[in-house]
Image (cartoon, coloured by chain):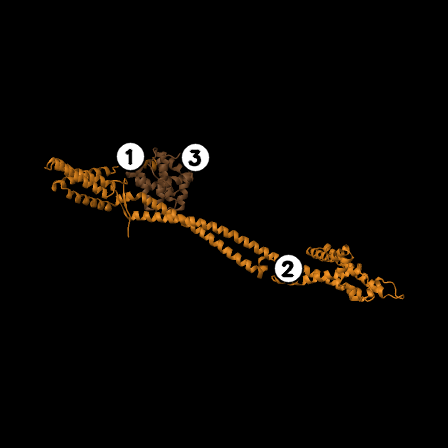
Amino acid sequence: MQKTKITVELKSHFLRLYQIALSDENFSHLEMQLLYKFAEERGVSNLELDKILTNPVGETTIPESLEKRIAYLYDLALMIWADNVVTIDEENTLKKYIQKFNFLDENVDELCEYLLESAKQEKSKQTILNELNE
Amino acid sequence: MGILKKLVALRPKNELKVVGTSQTNQNSKIDYNTEGYETSKSCQGREYTLKTSLETIYQKFENDSKIDISNQERLKQPYTTELKGKTTALLNKNEEKETLEKEVQTYENEIEKLHQDTINVRRNPNEYGLNVDKKSTAKFWIGLLFLLPLSAYILIFYISTSYSAFFRTFDPSTSLFQGMFYPKALSKAYTDGLLELGFVLFIPFVFFALGYLIHMFQENKGLINVFKIIALFVITFLFDSILAYLIDEKLYNLNKTFDSPEFSVAIAFQSVGFWLIIFAGFVSYIVWGLVFDFVMKEHADRDKIQSFITDKLEEIVNKEKRIIKIKNGIKNIQDGISVLEKRIAELQNIVDGFILPIRNYKLLSAQYLQGWQKYIDAELRIGVNEKNILQETCRGLYEKHIKSLELDVDDYQNKVYTKTL
């Protein structure tokens, strides 16, 4: 695996994913697998991911570009669907992040629903990004 | 425009959400400062009242912190997250431990079965694919019991017979039995010479070797082996016949008269002595060969069972070694579990308890003191010296109060009150 430098932004993303996975009180192995899959997709080794998760100290940032924000939020939605159950806690956490990512308050619920629905339909990230540019 | 595109409008960058904490802090600063000022005014800045007031505002601060659930949740967030992480880790560890324990159980069952096998194989060797007689041990020992005296007999018989046949000079008093068996064969052979002694000593081994060869040929099936065995029997028989012929001839010649014909094969065949020697030698030789063959076969069976048991014991040792390794692994996991459980209990107590943001209190109480002293400075009408002394006393009281809360030395932000029973 090619070694990539882990930016604060990426680290924040993994911590958010971890938070989402934990928010339903049950960190299932499916969620764990997905987390490691996301890490692999971004060239982060398992060891590095473990390091991030066990040492979550430091600032967290949100991504700059709109595409990245949507991509990251979609990852969160996929993580919520990893165990095939969407709990209220998970939904609220996702909404919290949508707000934190600076989307308009009035759109939060709808955007959350859209992301979860897309994740349920197992749309690819590329499809979501294409829809963004339609 | 796609649905998503409609939803993704962002807030302008400068429009940040009001968090609300700075405003609250500002208000509380004014409040405590004013409160300090007002209380000081009402009691003329008296130090005893300051002491009581500080204690009161500490209690109030503590109570407020307790009932401010949302703030408590925020303060407990790191502990809650850690607790969830540790709980998951504990679940994983327990699962891992269970898997290993099951593995140990499987190995233990296998070992138990192997032990049973080592015991049962003697009773029912056929069950284990060993085509052997289960009474082979007893048969082996009984066979050996016969084989040893038979060997001794053959040794004695051939030593004495061969000596009689090849070296002995007969005299007229020699009977048939004495002709065949000569008690002094060994000592006579020794007196005759070393070669004679060697000859009579080693000739029985020719027969033993022939018997051994018969056993070896019998192990392999096939027509050639049958011929070989027949040939061996014939050779032994001939050899015995020659010995018998020689002895019988010597005896015959002693009793020969002028009328008697020359000793020949035909005469030998009619002589009882000739046949007696053959039977005493050849038959006992055949019996020896059969017993030897039988003993060897039983020994092989015993070997099969023994090697089966040895294999199983080796397997047991290997499995036991593996169990020890797994048990060490379990112990390590158990240690990990204990550490996790301890930490989880601690975290649970913290989450169940409450967290006092004690640094905030230092700020508030300082503001209170500030208000208190402000009154003394600005409005209290006493002499400068008295004023200074009072200020000093109030300051001292405040520091004592802070010290009693250990806020003077520690630089931690929060004080954690764990749940106690």
Residue occupying the point 42% across, 40% down: A47
Number of the label disc, if any, that sits on residue A3:
3
Element at badge 2? helix
Q: Amino acid at mark 1?
A: Arg
Q: Is A55 placed left or right of B209 in the picture?
A: left
Element at badge 1? loop
Q: Which comes before the other along the chain, label 2 or label 1?
A: 1
Q: Residue B42: x and y, percent?
A: 12, 42
Q: What residue occupies the far left of the structure in this picture?
A: B381
Number of the label disc, if any, that sits on residue B11:
1
Name which quarter of the figure residue B280 lies in: bottom right
Q: Is B17 placed left or right of A66 in the picture?
A: left
Q: Amino acid at mark 2?
A: Glu
Q: A53 and B333: which one is in front?
A: B333
Location of mark 2 (residue)? B298
On the same chain: label 2 and label 1?
Answer: yes
Q: How many marks?
A: 3
**Up-down: is B74 above or below B224?**
above
Q: Are marks 2 and 1 in contact (CB under 8 Å)?
A: no
**Up-down: is B386 above or below B199?**
above
> In the rendered view of the protein, which quadrant contains the N terminus of chain B?
top left
Q: Which chain is orange?
A: B
On the same chain: label 1 and label 3?
Answer: no
Badge 2: how crowded within 10 Å, few (<14), some, or many (20+)?
many
Q: Residue A93: x and y, percent?
A: 32, 42
Examine the rendering and report whether any part of residue B285 can be seen: no
Q: In the image, which is nearer the foreground, mark 2 or mark 1?
A: 2
Label 1 vs label 3: CA separation? 35 Å
Q: Residue B186: x and y, percent?
A: 75, 60
Label 2 vs label 1: CA separation? 97 Å
